[in-house]
Image (tube, grey):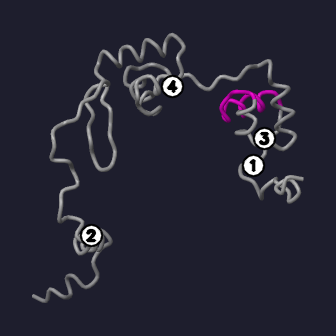
Amino acid sequence: MDLRREFENPCPHLKTLSLRRSRGFYDHDQRSSGPTVSDSRGRVVRSLRMAQTLLRPEQVDDLVAQYREGATLVELASVFGVNRRTVATHLTRREVTIRRGRFDPSRIHEAADLYLSGLTLVEVGVKVGAGPQAVRRALASHGVVIRPGGRSGSRITAPTAVGG
C-alpha cells in the first residue's frame, strides 16, 4: 500500500490539525488544573482566556423580576456582573419577551431633522437616547426615507479636522 498517495492531498481539517501539532499546540493543556474559583457573585468558570460567571437559580429569578419591573438589559448586566447577551439568554430561557429599544415619540421631529441633516441612525440614536433600530423604525413609520447603510467617506472636512 502506497501511503504517499493517501496523504498527498489532505483535506483542510487535516492540514489544520497537522499545522497545530507541528507548532506544539497540543503539547500542553490550556485549561487550569487548579480548583474552581468562587467570588462574591458565585462560582466562576475559567476556560481559555475567559472567565464566566454562573448565576445561581435565585439570582436568575431576581434578574427576571427586575427586568419585569423595567430594568434594562445593560443595567442588569452591570448589576449581576455578566454580559448583556447573557442576561438576554437567561430571560429567553425563562420565556420572557425581550423589550425592544424605546423611542420617545415626542422627539420624532428632532430625530428626523438630525437624520435629514446627514447624521447616521447611530448618531441620531445617541442624541435622542434610543437605539439605531428604534430610531429607524420610528423614522420609517413617519415617512422618512432611510438611506442605504454605510458611508462613502468621512464627513469631517480638512478645516474642521485641524480645528478651524
Q: Tell me how far mark 3 sits from mark 4, CA to CA.
A: 27 Å
Q: Tell me how far mark 2 sits from mark 1, CA to CA.
A: 43 Å
Residue type, label 1:
Pro
Asked whether 83 falls inside the magenta stretch, the response is no
| Residue 20 marker | 2
- Which dot, 2 or 1, sits closer to the camera? 2
Residue type, label 2:
Arg
Q: Is residue 109 above or below residue 11?
A: above
Residue denoted by label 1: 148
Q: Tell me how far mark 3 sits from mark 2, CA to CA.
A: 47 Å
Where on the picture, by quarter, is residue 126?
top right
Of labels 3 and 2, earlier in sequence is: 2
Of labels 2 and 1, earlier in sequence is: 2
Residue denoted by label 3: 146
Q: Tell me how far mark 4 sits from mark 1, CA to CA.
A: 29 Å
Q: Residues within 10 Å of mark 2 (few under 14, many from 20)?
A: few
| Residue 73 marker | 4
Residue found at the far front of this picture: 163
Residue type, label 3:
Ile
Q: Is residue 48 above or below residue 121?
A: below
Q: Tell me how far mark 2 sits from mark 4, CA to CA.
A: 39 Å
